Image: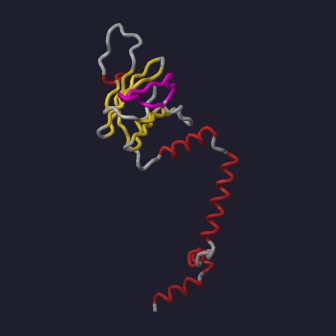
Amino acid sequence: MSDHKDRKDRKDHKGDNDGIDDVFDEEPFPDEEFTLDLLEEELRQAAAILDPVPPALRELAVEAFALHDLDSRIAELSFDSVVDAIPVRGALAAPRMLTFHAGEVTVDVELTAQGLMGQVLPPQSARIEVLTGPHSGSPLTTDDMGRFTHEEPPTGPFALRLRTGEGVIVTDWLTV
């Protein structure tokens, strides 16, 4: 009973609180979700006009999403000669050696100014793509010993995507 009396007292003293309680007592709009959806769409359109996403960034985002493959395994970097090797005195242009592991599969890569070459161990046939941004290079194929070569050195961040008979393997991304 006292709760009912408190509400009645609040309604009688509307002028005292400038109708603030009335705002909180209102029922939500039946189309409130629809109204929020419209507002969100208007904000998206305004952002697209005032601060559009650069086409190259949009393309990178699409490519990154395309890499999202639930069946792919990540080949983690386990050795990088820039970090892990002891420098050799007098060696000016030593190749960068990289080793990636994904389960039982190992990928050894040598980076030089002339390109990259590598080997998949245990030896197996694989299609390999050198990913360097929005466009992957032309697919490479391993030989009978699991070896592959790519005539162009990567110029920025890169990764390798291997398609073997057992599935897809993607290496960690590295910068040159």
In this rendered view, identify the residue nearer to me: 76 or 44. Answer: 76
Residue that protrudes farthest toward the right in the picture: 49
Quadrant assignment, res 78: top left
* Magenta run includes residue 152: yes
Relative to 69, residue 173 above or below: above
Identify the residue at horizontal 36%, vertical 23% (top origin): 97
Provide residue 24's location: percent of width, then percent of height.
56, 75
Relative to 41, residue 23 above or below: below
In this rendered view, identify the residue nearer to me: 176 or 73. Answer: 73
Residue that protrudes farthest toward the front in the picture: 144
Part of the protein shown in magenta: 140-156
Relative to 154, residue 3 above or below: below
Task: Decide if residue 94 is on the left or right side of residue 17.
Answer: left
Residue that protrudes farthest toward the bottom in the picture: 1
In this rendered view, identify the residue nearer to me: 66 or 105. Answer: 105
Does the magenta stretch mainly form a helix, a strand or a loop? loop
* Magenta run includes residue 145: yes
Residue that protrudes farthest toward the top in the picture: 90
Provide residue 153's location: percent of width, then percent of height.
49, 23
Task: Decide if residue 131 is on the left or right side of residue 97.
Answer: right
Provide residue 138's location: percent of width, then percent of height.
53, 32
